[in-house]
Image: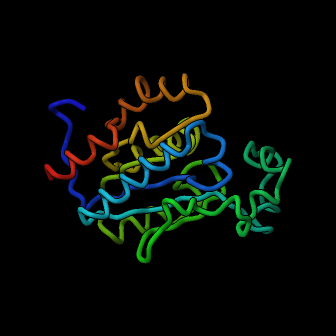
Amino acid sequence: MTDTTPTIDPHRTALLVMDYQEAIVGMIDDSEALVARAAQAIELVRGRGGHVGYVRVAFTAADLENIPPTSSMGARIASSPQGFMDDAPTTQIDERVAPRDGDIIVRKTRVGAFSTTDLADQLAQRGVDTLILAGISTSGVVLSTVRDGADRDYALFVLSDATADRDQSVHDCLMDSVFPRQATVITVDELEGLLSAA
């Protein structure tokens, strides 16, 4: 964060907690600390009157039937489709960062948060023009959502310590070299100051 980092108007902001679900959280080393930082960010945003949104990846039987054979997502799911089903415990949002009544919740069937959901409509209904992103993984949902969110003209902030990837070198490269082209990279501790300043 620098002196030119913009402040965040919490009333026009949504924190997106992406793919914080049992099977995905379990793939990350030191997931306890990661989830604790995400929970801290959620409470900060809630406490300032901001919006919280949840994005999870899960499939119905019809979704699986409609994935074309060329899909890389389909190829990954084919090995254990039951673990990706909408009602499977592995696709539910981690209870430590569980949604509350009134939160945005979307279920996606691709990597990014927008392409197979009504997320943009739900954000527009709330007057949101700024997104704070926390997610697993950095090279998956976070990268896709940064790119798509920038194309949709959102102001973007990425929480570097509430985002994780199984490959730390990829995480670091994205945070240091890629994301700053389209987003402001901050920590959860820095988020508190930005929301307070607003």
Left or right of 115 in this view: 192: left
Residue 50 versus residue 154: which sits nearer the camera? 50
To which quarter of the image does residue 27 belong? top right
Image quarter hosting the N terminus: top left
Residue appearing at x 13%, y 49% in the figure: 197
Indicate the position of residue 48 as horizontal and vertical percent values: 23, 62
Q: Position of residue 44 (x, y in %)?
A: 30, 56
In the shown orientation, is residue 76 left or right of residue 169?
Answer: right
Residue at 64 percent across and 52 percent down: it is 110
Rendering coords of residue 51 (x, y %):
34, 64
Farthest-out residue, bottom: 101
Quarter of the image holding residue 129? bottom left
Identify whether 113 is placed above or below 65. above
In the image, residue 19 above or below residue 136? below
Residue at 45% x, 68% y is 104
- Decide: is 32 above or below 119: above
Residue 178's x, y, as percent?
Answer: 44, 27
Chosen colour scheme: rainbow
Q: Which residue is drawn at 74% across and 58% down?
A: 84
Count every numbered label the image shows and give the total.
0
**Which residue is outermost to the right?**
79
**Position of residue 14 in the picture relative to residue 75 (left or right):** left
